[in-house]
Image (cartoon, grey):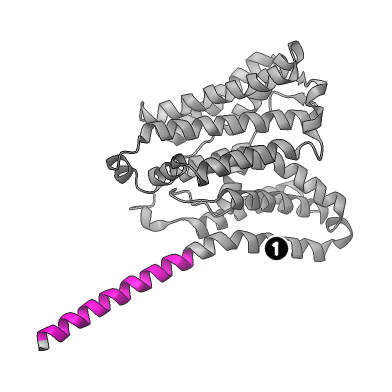
């Protein structure tokens, strides 16, 4: 009887520990989902109090939304890459190269042909990144860092360092409300792909436990290639929309975009360790970045301090969202 009671006590303790672990994990997941919304609301309140006459206006809200569209479009593809446990540092350069090729084709043929050409360029760059990672076993950080330089160099060669004007039938993508259409289309496509297909589950599985996913029959290499292809496509579309806003595809367009995109994804609560994430929260992350920069400009903060603030926000986001249990040793 005494032994039986001890066994029951052990089982009860184990059940209690398991319940506590579930509650702790569940609490962390809830926090990861809602912290971005809280941060967004806090920024709006802070800048609303600091400069109500300039910040809390319809025109400024529209400006922030328009600025967010390009970042969000590119970030949707990068979100899938990060959920899959990888990273894409080439999106800014791919956006520039795609828009440059697309603009030149559009001027020679028509706007639709230019858009298709831009997407094809993005697909090729994304496929190269994915193949390098999946089959050549080059870490995604190194592979995409190399693509960043290659794509930027090709952009400079292709353009002769000169901008290429965008066609008139792209103008609707550069201003509201037309600029929202590509953003909505890309969001719906990626949201449905991730949330309602087996591919979306495979992406989370590869990012969460790649070996387990492989043993379960998931074609890991194909998933890796596809997420980078999608990232290349979204980078291309973002590049076209950016060029439409400016009125020309420029050789240095998208410089530094990769870090801003990663910041938007992480601020949305998607951990760099992969396995989970939210495309809706990525929109919130993109809004946080643009509201932060917009508010700092309005209150008169210099460009240098804006860069520092953006870096600190990224650090804080990683600190909150990173799942340290998935990292054996942090170096």
Q: Position of residue 237 (x, y in %)?
A: 65, 30
Find residue 218 and report its horizontal and vertical position in percent.
34, 38
Residue 208: tell me if it is visible.
yes
Element class at badge 1: helix
Q: Residue at x 33, y 43 (%)?
A: 213
User: Residue at (71%, 47%) from the top-left corner?
Assistant: 304
Q: Is residue 254 at least partly visible in the picture? A: no
Position of residue 187 in the picture relative to residue 143 (left or right): right
Q: Is residue 197 above or below residue 225?
A: below
Can residue 130 be found in the magenta stretch?
no
- At label 1, counting other C-alpha atoms closer than 10 Å, the crowd grade (few under 14, some 14-19, many 20 or more) is few
Q: Is residue 287 left or right of residue 6?
A: right
Task: In this rendered view, identify the residue nearer to me: 272 or 226.
Answer: 226
Residue farthest toward the bottom in the current orientation of the protein: 2
Residue 181, x across and y down, in percent: 73, 37
Please state if 127 lies on the left or on the right of 37 as rendered: left
- Count of numbered marks: 1
| Residue 11 counted in the magenta span | yes
Which image quarter is the N terminus in? bottom left
Q: Is residue 285 above or below residue 179?
A: below
Which residue has dot 1 on it?
41
Q: Which residue sits furthest top? A: 108
| Span shown in magenta | 3-28
- Residue at image location 83% in from the left, 56% down from the top: 55
Q: Nearer the viewer, residue 72 or 89?
A: 72
Residue occupying image coordinates x 21% and y 79%: 10
Main SS of the magenta segment? helix
Residue 124, percent from left and from top: 53, 22
Based on the displayed image, in which of its 4 quarters is residue 191 positioned? top right
């Amino acid at each position: 009887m005494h032994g039986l009671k001890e066994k029951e006590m052990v089982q009860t303790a184990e059940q209690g520990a398991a319940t506590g672990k579930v509650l702790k994990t569940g609490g962390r997941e809830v926090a990861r989902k809602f912290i971005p919304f809280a941060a967004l609301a806090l920024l709006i309140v802070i800048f609303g109090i600091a400069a109500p006459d300039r910040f809390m206006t319809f025109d400024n809200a529209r400006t922030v939304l328009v600025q967010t569209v390009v970042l969000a479009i590119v970030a949707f593809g990068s979100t899938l890459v990060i959920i899959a446990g990888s990273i894409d540092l080439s999106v800014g350069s791919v956006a520039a190269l795609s828009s440059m090729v697309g603009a030149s084709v559009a001027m020679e043929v028509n706007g639709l042909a230019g858009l298709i050409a831009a997407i094809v360029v993005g697909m090729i760059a994304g496929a190269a990144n994915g193949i390098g990672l999946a089959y050549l076993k080059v870490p995604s950080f190194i592979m995409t860092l190399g693509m960043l330089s290659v794509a930027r160099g090709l952009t400079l060669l292709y353009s002769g360092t000169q901008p290429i004007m965008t066609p008139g039938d792209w103008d609707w993508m550069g201003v509201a409300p037309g600029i929202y259409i590509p953003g909505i289309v890309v969001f719906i496509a990626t949201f449905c792909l991730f949330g309602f297909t087996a591919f979306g589950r495979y992406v989370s599985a590869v990012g969460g436990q790649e070996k387990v996913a492989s043993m379960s029959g998931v074609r890991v290499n194909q998933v890796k290639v596809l997420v980078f292809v999608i990232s290349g496509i979204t980078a291309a579309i973002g590049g076209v929309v950016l060029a439409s806003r400016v009125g020309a595809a420029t050789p240095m367009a998208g410089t530094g975009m990769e870090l801003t995109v990663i910041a938007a994804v992480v601020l949305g609560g998607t951990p760099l360790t992969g396995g989970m994430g939210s495309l809706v929260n990525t929109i919130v992350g993109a809004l946080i970045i643009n509201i932060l920069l917009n508010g700092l400009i309005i209150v008169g903060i210099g460009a240098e301090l804006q860069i520092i603030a953006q870096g600190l926000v990224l650090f804080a986001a990683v600190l909150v969202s990173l799942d340290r249990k998935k990292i054996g040793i942090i170096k």
